Image (spheres, grey):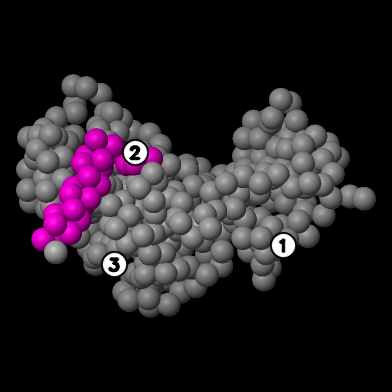
Amino acid sequence: MAFDIDDFLIKSQKAQASDIHLNCNKTPSLRINGEIYKIQTTPITYSDIESILEKTLPKEYAKIIKDVKDIDYIYEIKGVSRYRVNYCKDIYHGKFTFRTIPYYIKSLSELALPEYLQEYTHFNNGIVFVTGATGSGKSTTLASLIEIINQTHKRHIITIEDPVEFVYEDKKAIITQRSLDIDVKDFKTGIKYALRQDPDVILVGEIRDKDTLLSAIEASETGHLVFSTLHTNGTVSSINRLKGFIEEASQDQFMKRLANCIRGIVHQQLVPTVNNGALAPAVEVLTFTSTVIDYIKDGKMNDLILLMQKSKQPNIMTMNTSLYDLYQKGIITKETALEYSLEKVEMEQMIRGMYRNATSDESIL
């Protein structure tokens, strides 16, 4: 019996799978609440792979599929979900990864994200970065921020993505969505032409290279609000990553330019909770206040780190502060807080400090 991809995706949706893995000569696997589960069924065959490719691949890619080793595209089952699909070769055979993209765009509160992030939607220019590893929820967070603008501001929003994931319905804003390879050549070209299309807000799917970065900065400097993502591990490391795109001789000048246009960096992780493996976001926030800008221009990164550690404000918050808050509320365990901490020694000190306070209170009684 032939493998029915739509039927399998619908069943996976009911199982609340975030990702579906289909490898040739292996049984299917699902990622649910961050963990991989192997499905006990017949292995995927070569002919199954070919039929899935034929059914799901957009016609625009038909001519290039034989010449590429990896390709990303969108597949949709009407009324069920959209899927970001990656097709690649796994020891000569085809392999699919389907990432579920829901139709409904959740609000910040529904995502359990800090309400402060809404402040980033009020800027008229500058850049906001959302960073994290693959699968950390960057696209979902960006979609929530874009939807806030869509609902509250009379603006033109242009998204340049690889591929287009969340699909927006025009509300107060009008939205133009463009996909790499189908609608536009690359991010740099997409930004170039976006500037000629009367934009207010530009979403750039990812900063991958120097040209895209400089194009995004130019867009922000000419009166546009830009949102984008980076694959980095922390807000400060994101600054260093951006700096690393530039030749060493030009880095000091670049950092001064960068400091003036970034509005904020949000770094997030999805961490397992005590609730049957469900995931919760832990978020590090760095808003570019005048003090932060001065530290970056002067290269005082250690002072910036100390500032973040001492901050008690929602616009500047470390990952440890977020994890510790989840731990105090009983949402995650101590072990999880330590595992996902970016500064484990400090995290241990924070947890021990809480225990010392508890002992002190008991002795008073």
Q: Do the residues labelled 3 and 1 touch (CB within 8 Å)?
A: no
Q: Residue at x 28, y 28 (%)?
A: 244
- Residue stretch rendered in magenta on the structure: 338-364
**Alpha-carbon distance for marks 3 and 2?**
22 Å
Label 1: state its secondary structure.
helix
Q: Residue at x 47, y 43 (%)?
A: 134
Which of the labelled discs sits on residue 74, or is there none? none
Is 354 inside the magenta-drawn segment?
yes
Left or right: 169 with respect to 22? left
User: In the image as oriented, which residue stretches furthest toward the top?
Assistant: 249
Q: Specify the principal SS of the magenta part.
A: helix
**Alpha-carbon distance for marks 2 and 1?**
34 Å
- Residue at the spot of label 3: 115
Q: How crowded is mark 2: few (under 14 residues within 10 Å), some or many (20 or more)?
A: some
> Label 1 sits on what residue type?
Ile
Label 2: state its secondary structure.
loop
- Residue at the spot of label 1: 10
Instruction: Identify the image quadrant of residue 281.
Output: bottom left
Say whether disc 2 or disc 1 marks the residue closer to the N-terminus.
Answer: 1
Say whether disc 3 or disc 2 marks the residue closer to the N-terminus.
Answer: 3
Task: Estimate the x, y position of residue 231 in percent, counting from the top left.
Answer: 39, 39
Left or right: 108 with respect to 20? left
Is 8 inside the magenta-drawn segment?
no
Say whether disc 3 or disc 1 marks the residue closer to the N-terminus.
Answer: 1
- Residue at the spot of label 2: 233
Q: Number of callouts in the render?
A: 3
Left or right: 257 with respect to 163? left
Task: Estimate the x, y position of residue 19 in percent, counting from the top left.
Answer: 61, 50
- In the image, residue 326 sits, relative to residue 254, either above or below, namely below
> Label 2 sits on what residue type?
Asn
